């Protein structure tokens, strides 16, 4: 059996703004499917990725109702990643920067997301095989 | 010999500092390190064979492994047979492989 690694990712982009978010979630997905221990430190706008009050919406311009629009919600992606990591025998530990949360009123996060500080990021990085910081430009 | 992974997400026709990433890769390779530049997102616009030369073929000639995210290529309708010399399509899994192996990774 392949060795289970521990990887840490730092994200900073808010949802629906950058292709970096798509790539970051793809990377986390790959690591989660391998059963790795995956740490995510969400900083700045990235704390809104698991915001529980995200709602799907219709698209009246294209004449599609909510179901037809099938709008992707990042909170559901994060929930799916947490579930996939557990299914594969690993764990996804998602930490939202508390100050960033307060600034944005983003305190209502989905289950499995915890509040922390940049000190948690340091601890995560120290305990990991590797760390990738995906910063905003 | 250290292993470096430079992830280039920027379109070279929009961001002049892509050259910084190339310079870093070239110098690291010249110093005897294993260097991979993994191009992703709009960065792949620069690896097209017909694109005005942004330096990827030169990087490959300098001993840098140049890989392009196959998903990003497909998203932009860039087929694998239309890439600059020395550029190889790769799944994103390669990034996780290298991270797991302890490569020094920089996102740009």
Image: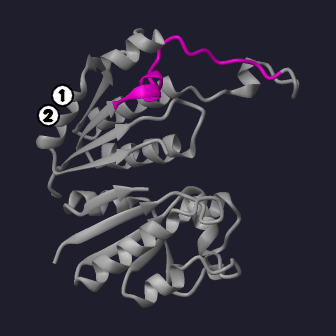
Q: Which of B98 and A118 is in front in this view?
A: A118
Q: What stretch is highlighted in magenta?
A: A42-59
Subunit under mark 1: A
Q: Residue at x 36, y 74 (%)?
A: B25
Residue A75 is a magenta residue: no
Q: Quadrant of residue A108?
A: top left
Q: Which residue is drawn at 18% across and 72% down?
A: B2
Tell me if residue A109 can be seen: no
Q: Which residue is drawn at 14% across and 34% down?
A: A123
Residue A45 is a magenta residue: yes
Tell me if residue A26 can be seen: yes
> Element under label 2?
helix
The x, y position of residue A83, in whole percent, is 35, 30
* Image depth: mark 1 or mark 2 in front: 1
Mark 1 closeness class: few <14, some 14–19, many ≥20 residues within 10 Å = few
Residue identifier under label 2: A123
Subunit under mark 2: A
- Decide: marks 1, 2 in contact (CB < 8 A)? yes
Mark 2 closeness class: few <14, some 14–19, many ≥20 residues within 10 Å = few
Residue identifier under label 1: A119
**Left or right of A126 on screen, residue A104:** right
């Amino acid at each position: 059996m392949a060795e289970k690694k521990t990887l840490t990712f730092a994200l900073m982009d808010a949802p629906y703004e950058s292709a970096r978010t798509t790539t970051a979630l793809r990377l986390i997905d790959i690591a989660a499917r391998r059963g790795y221990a995956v740490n995510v430190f969400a900083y700045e706008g990235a704390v809104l990725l698991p915001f529980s009050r995200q709602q799907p919406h219709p698209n009246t311009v294209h004449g599609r109702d909510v179901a037809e629009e099938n709008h992707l919600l990042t909170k559901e992606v994060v929930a799916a990643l947490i579930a996939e990591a557990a299914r594969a025998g690993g764990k996804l530990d998602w930490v939202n920067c508390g100050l960033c949360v307060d600034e944005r009123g983003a305190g209502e996060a989905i289950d499995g997301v915890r509040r922390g500080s940049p000190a948690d990021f340091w601890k995560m990085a120290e305990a990991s095989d590797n760390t990738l910081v995906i910063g905003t430009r | 010999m250290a292993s470096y992974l430079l992830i280039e997400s920027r379109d070279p026709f929009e961001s002049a500092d892509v050259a910084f990433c190339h310079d870093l890769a070239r110098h690291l390779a010249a110093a005897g390190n294993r260097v991979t530049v993994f191009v992703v997102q709009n960065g792949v616009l620069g690896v097209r064979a017909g694109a005005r030369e942004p330096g990827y073929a030169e990087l490959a000639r300098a001993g840098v492994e140049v890989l392009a995210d196959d998903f990003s290529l497909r998203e932009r309708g860039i087929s694998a047979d239309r890439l600059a010399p020395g550029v190889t399509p790769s799944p994103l899994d390669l990034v996780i492989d290298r991270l797991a192996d302890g490569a020094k990774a920089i996102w740009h």
